[in-house]
Image (cartoon, rainbow, N blue to C red):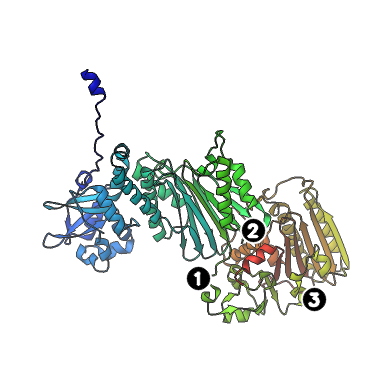
C-alpha cells in the first residue's frame, strides 16, 4: 500500500535555476594606471585565457576595464609599441579612453540571465567580450560574455523540464529571446547600392537557428551570409547570437573575403559551443563595380545563380567543414562573374528536406523548377511562389524546421563617385548626352544618366584614353571611337556611329562591302588552326600590301583570335571555360566556328564568328580595365587574349547575341605604321533587351 502511494505521489520538477555571476567569474588581479603599457601587453600575450583586466585609479577605486581584443588590436601595431614604450597606462588613456570602457559592471550575486539581458540592451552588437565583476570587497575579477551565453545554452535541460510548471513566466522569457533574436537580424528588405532583394525567415519555434546577414564595404563590395545551426530553439539561438557578434566585428574591420569570414566565424563558434553545436554557412561577396562574385562554403546548401540573359540556373558548388567543427579551419574560395539582372538565391536545408505525408522530400528538382519558372518575376513573387509551392506539396503550412529564403538581384553597377539612391545625388555632374568627348569627361567627371541606353553611349576620343577605361567600364560604356583615326573614313564614320541600330550577323561583310580579296574557313578540329594560319600567311604575302612588316602583327592577331574562339568562347553556365588552352579536340556537331578574312584598299579585316554567345560586356571591359591598371591577368580566369586583340587592332568591333552568336571583327590598316602605344577604338554591341532595361529602369 505504501509502495502504491509512493508510486503515485507527484514530485514537482526541480526549479529551473540559472548560475550566478560568481560561478563563472574568472579571478583577475586588478592593475593600476601606473602600470607600464608594455607590461600590460605582456600579461595578455603570456596568458591566453585572460580576456580582460580591471583597472584601478590612484585611490584604489574602480576606474575601468581593458578588453584583450581592443588592447591587442591597438598594441600589436608597430607604431603603438614604439609610441608607448616605457609609458604608463594613464598616458595611453589620452586619446584612447574607449579602451577602458565597459557597458556595465556585473555584480557577483546577480543571475547571468539578468546580466545578459541588461548587457544586450546596452550592447546589442556584442562588441565587448568581458565585464568587470564586483563583490563585497570590490572588484574580484571578470566574466566572459561567451561563457555566460554558453552556460545559458547548457541549462536548456532544466529549462525544458520546468516549462510546463512555469509556462507563463518562461514563455515570456522565450518571447523576449525571440524578439531579441529578430532585432539582431537586419531588415528583410535589402536595398544596397547595386543590389536589391528580399529575405524571408520562418522559425519553427520561438527561437530559431537560421541566420542571415549582409553588409557593405566601402560602398562597393556587398557581403552576404546565410547560415543554419544544427537544431533549433534557445541553444541554437545562442549560437546565432555569437555568429551575429562575430559578423559585427568583421564588418567593422571591413572584411570582405568569404573564406576569411568563414574561418574567423568558425573559431568563434568553436570557442562558444565547444563542438556541442555546429553551424553551416554560405558566404558571398559581390563587387558591384565589376560584377565579380567570390564565394565560400562551410557545409551549407549550394547557392544558386540565375543568369537572366541566358535564362539559366547554375549551382555554386563548393564544399567545406561546418563552422565550429575545428579550430583554424581554412576554406576554399571560388570566383565567378555575374551580369546586370542576374540573381543570387540562398536558402536553408528545410526547403528541400521538408517531407509530405508520404515521407517524400520537396527536393532540389522542385526548388530549381520554381526558380527557373519565376526567373523573370519580381523577387517578392518568387519568394511567395516558392513558399506556396512548398506548402501545397506538404499539405500543411506549418514547418518542422526553420525556413530561410534569401534572394538578391544585381541591378546596376556602382560608380566610384559615391553611393546613394538617386543618380542626381551621386554627383553634381550628370552626363545626359549619348555622345561626349574624352576632354569633356576629364573636365566634367560625372555619372552618365541611367536614362540613356548604354548601347547608344559613345565616347569620342581626341587622344589616348586608356586611363579612363576603368571609370567608363564601371558605368557600362562599351563604345569608344577615335575621332581623327584614318580608319574611320575607310569604314564610314556614320556607319560606325550607328552600329547599335543594326543586328548584323556578319559585320565584316557590312563594313568592307567591296573587298579586293576574301577568304573563308570553317573549323572542324582545333588542329585546323595551324593549317589555316599558314594558309592565310602565305595568301597575305602574295598580296601587294604596303608596310609588309605588319604581316607578323597580323598573324599574331589572327592566332589570338582563333585561340579565343577555340578555348575562350566555349563556357559553362558559370562563365568557366570548358577547355584549357591548347586542348586538342574535335568540334561538336552543334558547334560552329568560322573565320573570314577580307582585304579592301589596304585595309585588312579579320572576323571570327562562333555560336556560343558567351562573351559579355562585363567580361570584356573588366579584362581591359585590369590590364590598363597594371593588374594583368585575372587569376583562374585569364583574359589576356582580349586585351592583346584590342591592342593589335586599329579598330575592334564585337557583336554578341547572348547564347546565340559572338562575332569579333578586328581591322588593321596596312597603309599606316603600327603604333603599339596608341589606344584603339572599339565597340561592343550587346543585343539583350534585358541588359538595357536594367540600366533604364529609373527613367
- Work out whether mark 1 precedes mark 2 in sequence or the reverse, and give the earlier one: 1
Left or right relative to 376: residue 184: left
Question: Which of the labelled discs sits on residue 420, or is there none?
Answer: 1
Q: How many angstroms separate mark 1 from mark 2 (CA)? A: 32 Å
Residue at left 69%, top 56%? 614
Location of residue 585 with respect to 336 vertically, above or below: above
Mark 2 is surrounded, within 10 Å at the Cα level, by few (under 14), some (14 to 19) or many (20 or more) other residues, namely many
Location of residue 292 with respect to 232 vertically, above or below: below
Question: Which of the labelled discs sits on residue 639, or is there none?
Answer: 2
Q: Position of residue 590 (x, y in %)?
A: 78, 48
Return the residue at label 3. 492
Front label number (1 vs 2)? 1
Nearest the viewer among 71 and 325 is 325
Element assignment for label 1: loop
Which picture quadrant has residue 444? bottom right
Dots 1, 2 in contact, CB < 8 A: no
Nearest the viewer among 380 and 106 is 380
Residue at left 28%, top 61%? 81
- Work out whether mark 3 precedes mark 2 in sequence or the reverse, and give the earlier one: 3
Which picture quadrant has residue 132? bottom left
Let me know if residue 164 appears in the view. yes
Nearest the viewer among 494 and 247 is 247
- Work out whether mark 1 precedes mark 3 in sequence or the reverse, and give the earlier one: 1
Q: Position of residue 406 (x, y in %)?
A: 52, 53
Q: Position of residue 67 (x, y in %)?
A: 27, 56
Element assignment for label 2: loop
Q: How many angstroms separate mark 3 from mark 2 (CA)? A: 30 Å
Which picture quadrant has residue 514? bottom right
Front label number (1 vs 3)? 1
Amino acid at each position: 500500500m505504501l509502495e502504491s502511494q509512493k508510486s503515485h505521489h507527484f514530485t514537482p520538477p526541480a526549479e529551473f535555476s540559472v548560475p550566478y555571476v560568481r560561478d563563472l567569474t574568472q579571478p583577475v588581479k586588478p592593475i593600476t594606471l601606473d602600470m607600464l603599457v608594455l607590461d600590460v601587453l605582456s600579461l595578455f600575450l603570456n596568458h591566453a585565457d585572460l580576456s580582460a583586466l580591471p583597472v584601478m585609479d590612484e585611490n584604489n577605486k574602480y576606474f575601468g576595464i581593458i578588453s584583450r581584443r581592443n588592447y591587442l588590436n591597438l598594441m600589436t601595431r608597430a607604431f603603438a609599441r614604439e609610441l608607448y614604450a616605457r609609458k604608463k597606462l594613464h598616458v595611453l588613456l589620452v586619446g584612447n579612453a574607449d579602451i577602458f570602457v565597459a557597458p556595465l559592471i556585473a555584480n557577483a550575486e546577480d543571475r547571468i540571465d539578468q546580466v545578459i539581458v541588461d548587457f544586450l540592451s546596452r550592447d546589442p552588437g556584442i562588441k565587448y567580450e568581458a565585464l568587470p565583476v564586483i563583490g563585497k570587497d570590490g572588484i574580484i575579477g571578470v566574466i566572459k560574455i561567451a561563457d555566460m551565453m554558453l552556460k545559458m545554452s547548457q541549462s536548456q535541460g532544466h529549462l525544458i523540464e520546468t516549462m510546463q510548471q512555469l509556462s507563463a513566466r518562461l514563455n515570456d522569457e522565450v518571447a523576449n529571446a525571440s524578439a531579441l533574436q529578430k532585432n539582431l537580424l537586419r531588415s528583410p528588405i535589402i536595398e544596397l547600392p547595386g543590389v536589391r532583394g528580399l529575405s524571408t525567415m520562418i522559425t519553427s519555434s520561438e527561437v530559431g537557428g537560421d541566420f542571415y546577414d549582409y553588409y557593405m564595404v566601402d560602398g562597393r563590395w556587398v557581403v552576404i551570409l546565410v547560415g543554419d545551426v544544427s537544431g533549433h530553439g534557445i541553444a541554437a539561438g545562442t549560437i546565432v547570437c555569437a555568429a551575429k557578434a562575430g559578423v559585427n566585428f568583421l564588418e567593422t574591420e571591413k572584411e570582405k573575403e568569404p573564406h576569411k569570414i568563414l574561418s574567423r566565424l568558425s573559431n568563434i563558434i568553436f570557442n562558444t559551443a565547444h563542438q556541442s553545436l555546429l553551424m553551416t554557412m554560405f558566404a558571398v561577396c559581390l563587387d558591384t563595380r565589376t560584377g565579380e562574385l567570390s564565394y565560400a562554403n562551410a557545409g551549407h546548401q549550394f547557392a544558386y545563380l540565375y543568369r537572366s540573359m541566358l535564362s539559366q540556373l547554375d549551382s555554386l558548388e563548393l564544399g567545406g567543414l561546418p563552422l565550429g567543427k575545428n579550430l583554424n579551419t581554412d576554406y576554399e574560395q571560388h570566383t565567378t562573374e555575374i551580369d546586370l539582372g542576374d540573381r543570387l538565391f540562398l536558402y536553408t536545408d528545410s526547403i528541400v528536406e521538408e517531407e509530405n505525408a508520404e515521407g517524400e522530400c520537396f527536393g532540389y528538382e522542385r526548388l530549381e523548377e520554381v526558380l527557373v519558372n519565376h526567373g523573370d518575376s519580381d523577387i517578392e513573387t518568387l519568394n511567395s511562389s516558392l513558399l506556396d509551392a512548398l506548402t501545397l506539396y506538404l499539405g500543411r503550412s506549418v514547418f518542422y524546421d526553420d525556413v530561410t529564403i534569401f534572394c538578391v538581384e544585381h541591378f546596376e553597377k556602382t560608380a566610384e563617385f559615391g553611393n546613394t539612391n538617386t543618380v542626381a545625388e551621386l554627383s553634381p555632374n550628370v552626363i545626359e548626352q549619348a555622345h561626349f568627348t574624352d576632354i569633356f569627361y576629364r573636365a566634367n567627371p560625372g555619372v552618365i544618366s541611367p536614362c540613356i541606353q548604354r548601347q547608344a553611349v559613345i565616347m569620342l576620343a581626341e587622344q589616348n584614353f586608356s586611363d579612363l577605361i576603368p571609370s567608363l567600364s564601371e558605368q557600362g560604356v562599351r563604345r569608344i571611337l577615335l575621332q581623327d583615326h584614318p580608319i574611320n573614313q575607310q569604314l564610314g564614320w556614320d556607319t560606325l556611329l550607328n552600329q547599335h541600330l543594326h543586328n548584323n550577323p556578319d559585320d565584316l561583310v557590312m563594313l568592307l562591302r567591296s573587298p579586293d580579296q576574301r577568304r573563308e574557313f570553317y573549323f572542324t578540329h582545333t588542329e585546323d588552326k595551324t593549317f589555316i594560319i599558314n594558309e592565310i600567311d602565305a595568301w597575305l604575302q602574295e598580296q601587294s600590301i604596303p608596310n609588309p612588316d605588319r604581316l607578323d602583327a597580323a598573324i599574331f592577331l589572327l592566332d589570338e583570335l582563333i585561340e579565343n574562339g577555340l578555348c575562350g568562347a566555349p563556357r559553362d553556365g558559370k562563365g568557366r571555360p570548358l577547355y584549357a588552352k591548347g586542348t586538342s579536340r574535335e568540334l561538336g556537331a552543334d558547334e560552329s566556328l568560322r573565320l573570314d578574312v577580307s582585304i579592301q584598299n589596304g585595309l585588312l579585316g579579320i572576323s571570327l564568328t562562333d555560336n556560343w554567345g558567351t562573351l559579355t560586356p562585363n567580361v570584356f571591359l573588366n579584362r581591359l580595365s585590369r590590364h590598363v591598371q597594371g593588374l594583368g591577368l585575372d587569376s583562374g580566369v585569364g583574359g589576356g587574349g582580349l586585351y592583346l586583340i584590342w591592342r593589335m587592332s586599329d579598330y575592334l568591333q564585337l557583336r554578341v547575341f547572348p547564347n546565340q552568336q559572338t562575332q569579333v571583327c578586328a581591322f588593321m590598316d596596312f597603309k599606316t605604321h603600327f603604333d603599339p602605344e596608341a589606344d584603339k577604338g572599339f565597340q561592343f554591341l550587346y543585343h539583350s533587351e534585358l541588359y538595357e532595361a536594367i540600366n533604364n529602369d529609373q527613367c
